[in-house]
Image: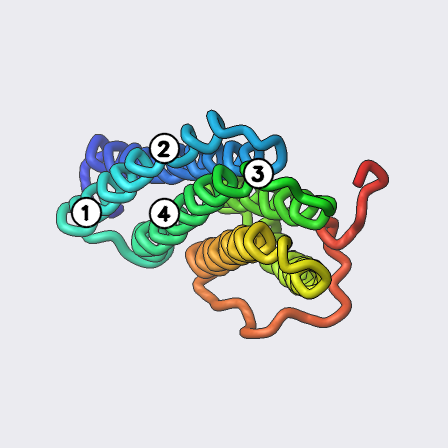
Amino acid sequence: MSDEPEHLVKSYETELKRLRSMMTEMGGIVESQVALAAQAILNRDTEAATKAVEMDPKVDAMERDIEQFVVRLLALRQPMAADLRFIIASMKMTGDLERIGDYAANVAKRSVVLSQFHLPFSLAGIAHMIQLVQEQLKSIIDAVGAGDIDKAVEVWRSDQVVDDIYNAIFRELITYMMEDPRNITPCTHLLFIAKNLERVGDHTTNIAETVYYAVRGEVLPETRPKGDTSAYAVVRPSE
């Protein structure tokens, strides 16, 4: 790019900033979707559930807009090195964000059905899982906007905590189902909700890995180190 006129270089830099801005905007919409889904499940809020589902087409449209923008950048600018990695990575990350939006919509839909049942047990485990997933998502969207690999690695490390909570919820719900057959239907919906939340965590982790690669040009190891001490693993006094 150094041989190009200064105004073209500035135009290219503006386009890269625009792409990053589009990514964070899409992430913000998805973050709102997850927040609405959380409100729907924890507060039996059908209005929040409806809003979460209605946001899905907007997320899909943003994914298409970003893909078109990326194709144009690749065709007209022929980027190299770190710029090329980021531009290609953005397509992968928007795919993960779109899937997170789908899972949030699924949680919202299940919450409407679940609200028709009296639950003789606490949703504390689900609430804890939702909180962690929301923290992960907020952090990784910030990391995308800033190209922050430290924050991306922190999110990547935290995924095991979400998996552990999911496994605990799974065992708890199976126990409720065995104790009373009347619990089978609501617990089944909760199992799907918990699995959708776990998948949100997985896709958030995928974005963390992509951010790391886009910035460093290296991939994170396939397995996380044992004995993780990230902030996500700490149970806060308010919980």
Q: CA distance from mark 4 to mark 2?
A: 11 Å
Foreground of the two, 174 or 61: 174
Amino acid at circle 2: Met
- Report the mark closest to the observer, 4 or 3: 3
Amino acid at circle 3: Ile
Q: CA distance from mark 4 to mark 3?
A: 21 Å
Q: Which residue is mark 4?
A: 98
Relative placement, left or right, of 121 versus 109 is right
Asked whether the beta carbons under mark 1 and mark 4 sit within 8 Å of each other, the answer is no
Q: CA distance from mark 2 to mark 1?
A: 33 Å
Q: Earlier in the sequence, mark 3 or mark 1?
A: 3
Relative placement, left or right, of 14 versus 212 is left
Label 3 element class: helix
Amino acid at circle 4: Glu
Q: Earlier in the sequence, mark 1 or mark 4?
A: 1
Q: Where in the figure is residue 110, as x and y percent of width and height?
A: 48, 45
Foreground of the two, 187 or 230: 187
Q: CA distance from mark 3 to mark 2?
A: 17 Å
Label 2 element class: loop
Question: What number is the disc on residue 41?
Answer: 3
Asked whether the beta carbons under mark 2 and mark 1 sit within 8 Å of each other, the answer is no
Q: Which residue is mark 1?
A: 77
Q: Earlier in the sequence, mark 4 or mark 2?
A: 2
